[in-house]
Amino acid sequence: MSISRQQTIIRVFRKYSHSLGPTELDFLEAVLERHEIDDEDVEQSIELIAKEYNKQDDAVMKVSLETLRRVYDALQSSGEQHVRREDAFVDPEKHLHFIDAFDMPLWRWSNERSTFEKPSHRPTSLGSADSRVLSARDRLNIIKQTILRNEHFTPSTIPTRDREHLLTIRSTKQLLGRPGQRFLLFGMLAHSKEGKLCLEDQDGIVELDFSELDQPSEGLFTEGAFVMVEGDYTENSTFLVIAVGHPPCESRETARSIFGHIDFLGKGATTPIEDSQYTQRIQEDFSDMTFFFFSDVWLDHPDTMRGLRKVFDNCIENNYIPKVAVLCGNFTSRGIAQGNSRDVQKYQEGFDALADLIASYHVLTQNTHIVFVPGPLDLAINSILPRRPLLSSFTARLRAKIPKLHLSSNPCRLKFFGQEIVVFREDMMARMLRNLVGVKPSVRNEDLKRYLVQSILDQSHLTPLTNNIQPVLSEYDHSLRLYPLPTVVVLADKYESYRMTYEGCHVFNPGSFVGNAFNFSAYTPANKESEAW
């Protein structure tokens, strides 16, 4: 076999942090020859074997021939037995799940095993000092392992000319005693006790000097964001920044190919092959199915009920019944002052009126799942993210009259076949802009929306901010992760409506359902696109 084919085999397994011995390499070469795989198809074929090997419970860094043989035999058996029945009925109800943030299983990153592990204890709302440290460390390690897997940072096992152009991430401890040299660092933007902007990683902290930086790369850089900075270490122990950027985003397909065996949502893990089969089935059998998303449904606004009635009437007249309708807060136009009984009563009356309105549409109540997600001003048990569902005392009539009611946390997730939809109600645009550090971008409107989406997805987290800016329950920080990248992220915000796709992830803001506009969005799982209405 040619050297180029061997190099391809080694490179593909190296991408998944596995190394091959001579015996395992010979076995894979024999497999390729047995099936008469052409040179241009070698990478794709080995990729399939490497992905399946990585999903095995006994997969180790040094590839085991026994496990490799088992994977190969399983792939052959599945190929022979795979018969699809075109006429088989699939009930979408059995593949539709609503996941509360407090029900998501906790997975922590293990540097020793280079994978996720489930701790023995159950998460608690109280948390601890250790859990606050671990949540930040998990964020750093999860992003860092995607960086090291990126082609610009992964060292090849085969010596090449491109090796000298490889970017190597250094630690802050490697700066000591090396002034005047250039480094590439990765860490979190934070302020020191003296109020100076610094970069912090697991080994230390270094003060940043942005005086030579005219414009950072695209995105919003906030305190608490994990960034990559390039620059020179100076004699006065500061880091003179010449370039700063967000870490590269890893696609859902790549992450799922490596960690597809891990059940991040607690509803059963599916393989990438099953996901692709589900995608085809949705396109064929459920092409007209839609999910509606509303935000800022102010129940104390005089036109809100009229607007909802208009939407529901149009659904009935056109026989266009959504499978899911997600109503996000705020459900009041202004916060309720502590002890103001009149405002609390109006808040209760608003939910009761909404329950009566929805119940008056029999077709909707029988066929549509109604989801309520609290906003920043709504009354819930806690105001720290993730937020608990709306207080039960306000939703008694909703529970009595709507059979398919889901009172969800903020954020929450929907799983539909192989698709994952994250719903988050927070005014993130304003919060991110208020907490920019370093060099602020001179952009607005469309570029600003793109920067927000890019920053949140690159950070693999819904709130890339420090805990003093946006408090988070440390043992439930995993519910705000965006890794693996979801299929859809709904960033419900009082900011104007938008929609875009970044690295294969569709992101949209339905806009506020207030005034005479009555803005909302309809998402179609068949084409993974949304439309503003």
Image (cartoon, rainbow, N blue to C red):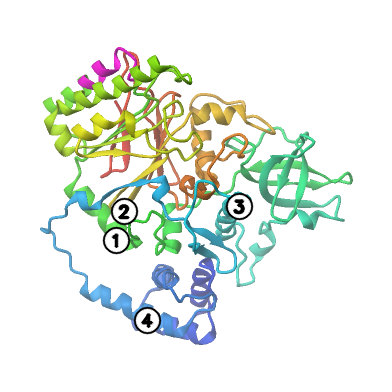
Quarter of the image for residue 114 reads: bottom right
Which residue in the structure is indicated by mark 3?
140
First in sequence: mark 4 vs mark 2: 4
Label 1: few (<14), some (14–19) or many (≥20) C-alpha neighbours in 10 Å: few
- Percent position of residue 103, x then y: 39, 50
Q: Is residue 331 above or below residue 242?
A: above
Which residue in the structure is indicated by mark 2?
418
Distance CA(mark 1)–CA(mark 3): 30 Å
Q: Amino acid at mark 2?
A: Gly
Q: Nearer the viewer, mark 3 or mark 2?
A: 3
Q: Amino acid at mark 4?
A: Arg
- Percent position of residue 330, x then y: 40, 25
Which residue in the structure is indicated by mark 4?
70
Query: Image quadrant for the C terminus?
Result: top left
Region in magenta:
299-309
First in sequence: mark 3 vs mark 4: 4
Is mark 2 in CB contact (under 8 Å) with mark 1?
Answer: yes
Element under disc 3: helix
Q: Say whether residue 308 is magenta.
A: yes
Distance CA(mark 3)–CA(mark 2): 27 Å
First in sequence: mark 3 vs mark 2: 3
Please name the residue shown 25% across and 45% down the image: 526
Element under disc 1: helix
Q: Amino acid at mark 3?
A: Leu
- Observer-nearest residue: 489 or 100? 100
